[in-house]
Image: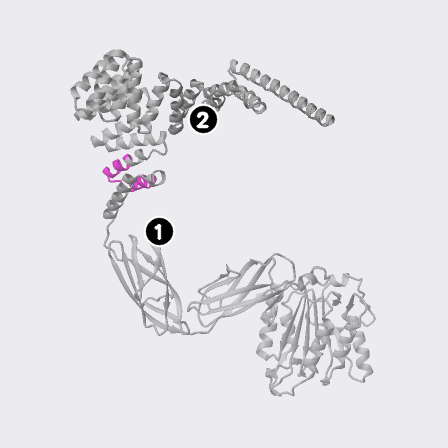
Amino acid sequence: MRSVLRSFLCSLILLSATLSVQAQTAKKYYSAGKKFMEMGNCQEAVNNFTKALEMDPQMEDVYISRAECYEKMDKKTEAAEDYRLATTFAPKEEKYFYNAGRLYFEIRQFEKADEMLKKALSLNKNYLDAIEYSIYTLLQLKKFTQALTLAEQAVDLKKSGLTYLNNAIVLDSMQLYAEAEKKYKDAKYYDSKLVMAYVGLSNTQVKLKKLDDAMKTCQTGMEKFVPARKEILFARSQVYAAKGDYLAAVNDLTQVILADDKSVIAFMTRGDYYLKLAMYPNAVNDYTKVILIQEKNANAYFKRAQAYEQMQNYKEAVKDYNKIKEIAPNDQNAMNYLVAAKQKLFELNREKNKPEIVMISPKADKKFVVKIGGDKKEMMVKGTITDESNIKSITVNGKEANFRNDTNVTDFIVTMDVTKLEQLTVIVTDVYNNVLEQLFAVEYTETGKPIVALVAPYTSFDKEIYLDNSNSELYIEGQVKDESKIESIRIEGQNASFDPSAQDPKFSATISISNKMKITVWVKDVYGNETIEDFKLNREGATISANNPMGVTWLIFIENSNYKNFASLDGPSKDVTLMKTALANYKFSNIVHKKDMTKAELDKFLSIELRDLIKANKVNSLMIWYAGHGKFQNNTGYWIPVDAKVDEEYSYFSIATLKSYMQSYSLVHTLVVTDACESGPTFLVAMRAGTEQKMCDDWTKTKFKSAQVFTSAGFELAADNSQFTKTFANTLINNPDGCIAIDKIVEKVKLAVKAKGMQEPKFGKISGLEDEGGTFFFMKK
């Protein structure tokens, strides 16, 4: 027990010591603050007073000192709060309540001011200063009866010019003008130099229509105060105005403004008098001066708008009325004038011209005929209306269209049922009831959907795009084929570039493909027929091309099996399948498989399409594998298209033609493998040396151009069941190294074919194409 008591006493002693130290430190900050205050450094004084209160928030004198500093710094809100806080520690100190109330009045927090001043008067009902501010506060709160009671109490306590003046002001506010006149005269009697007594008396006499008396009051004030006080000059201007002498009133106000060029009330009042004198530009100038001083003075905008109206400058008037809507949305009087100004504008702008219409969708020709796709059941009818005035209504076949008036050009849109529609009747009415009624005859058009083909990057027949890099953006080129003109092409929501006047236009766009597995191409023709195509993105080629010494490498299979006039073949299909399996583990950026090609198709693909694909996709190395019938006739080799006719040489595809096409490919490496009878000799210009070995670590061979051909047969017929292809594929499949050169494959294939007693395959350079001694390497993944 003694231990617990000892511990408690120790804690109490420590707490007492801590509080004592804090109290001493707080007093030091207070003392430092007072010294800064004496030196006139209010900011440092406030800083020290604040630190003192942080340590001891119950120091009454510190709140008062800080409040005095705040007031000197014109921080009246902070000062009022400090006086209010001081009252909690000194609830009997009437002066603290008074100062708080006085400051709350000055920052226009009248309810708080009333509360503080009432507490001051409850402590001292004869506190004249508090009575005075309480009167002013009650007038602001429109508590006139309470204000009058206090004003009469002040007169009873002390008959002075100020107490009578305050009494008069209360009576004036209550519209008791006769009683107010007497009190203003009493104020003048008790203090002949009280300027506001003369001003108040003159104003009250004007209200009582004692204009001569009011003028005498001003004259007496003018004689009493030399030079003339601006307050009395202002009062006299009001007397002149009441007499209808606005020029004299303007002269007095001009003197007021010369004495105080920031006097809002003088500029406003002189502007009003200029309005009376029909001197509207002068009035505009005065109201503009007010706006420069007080940017949000709604009354100045309101009066200036009136002056603009008189000048018939309705556009400027509307601007000012609209400004009032921003700064004084509850000013109903201003809103009434806004309506009036708009009505005047409406009448001034009245015109009799009919609106004009342009149909956008469906488009109309010069004969007012619109064409709609024959399979359309519903479509968006769109158009543009041009008119000098705003549009009131637009209907299409009696259905209200959506539109919005922004400028003289108005767009409209409406969804219409267009099944069995014979005509579109568009009726447009503007705000002046000028009416346009336009009839459009309807013709139904073709319903074929556009066909989309991508040129770059290459797209397979199953709509798969092979990417050869990992870029986040993809440049796309393509072409649209359609019976009609194309209206829009979008790729992934982005407009593609194309010529809308061209038939079957080419298009291009650069789009972002980050984190995308596919892209969507949307095409619409001018008749609303739409095609939406999704294309898968295959990024395997990007990885392959990035580390392939052969660069971007493509493989083209041409498989001709199903002939019309020649014997059909089973071998090409099997051979291509086998080769695809063998090459699956090798680096090819893209594989293109063409089947059963006609002569026209071979010509078009090898002369134009393949050339453009190579260019667009920056292909570096190309291997073409042909499997099908071949022919050697009149010293010329041919591939046989599936539509070729027996013994009609012109229906064959010439190897010489192929070589001429290949000259435009601009490749580093070209390899043609042809598993066809009789076609080989036309290709070869010189056989390569069989002893030269091409090794995988000899990368120089990938830098030098090569143009090579490997053909299964010479002049004799080739077998449908090809040993040539089997050995070629097996060599690739069983290759243990990271790569293999075509030269080594040739060596293996020749040995295997000769062992079977078949004719020896031929390998050499392609005549007519550039060859620098390089070779074609098959690079493993």
* Relative image position of residue 690 (x, y in whole percent): 81, 72
Residue 455 x/y as whole percent: 57, 66
Location of residue 563 by image quarter: bottom right
Q: Identify which amino acid the numbered label 2 is placed on.
A: Thr
Q: Position of residue 662 (x, y in %)?
A: 64, 70
582 within the magenta span: no
Q: In front: 34, or 512?
A: 34
Query: Label 1 sits on what residue type?
Result: Asp
Magenta span of residues: 303-323
Are there few (<14), some (14-19), or many (20+) residues within 10 Å of tag 1?
few
Residue hosting label 2? 77
Q: CA distance from mark 1 to mark 2?
A: 47 Å
Check the image and report above or below for 408 versus 194. Answer: below
Against 507, is 159 above or below? above
Classify mark 2: residues with Cα within 10 Å, few (<14), some (14-19) or many (20+): some
Question: Magenta-highlighted stretch: main secondary structure?
Answer: helix
User: Residue 516, how many percent across, how many down?
Assistant: 60, 60
| Labelled disc at residue 406 | 1
Question: Of callouts 1 and 2, which one flags the residue occurring earlier in the amino acid sequence?
Answer: 2
Q: Quadrant of the C terminus?
A: bottom right
Whether 457 is drawn above or below 52: the answer is below
**Horizontal side of residue 776 vs 165, given as left or right:** right
On the question of residue 655 being in view, the answer is no
Query: For residue 309: magenta?
Result: yes
Quarter containing the N terminus: top right
* Marks 1,2: beta carbons within 8 A: no
Instruction: State whether residue 190 appears in this view.
Output: yes
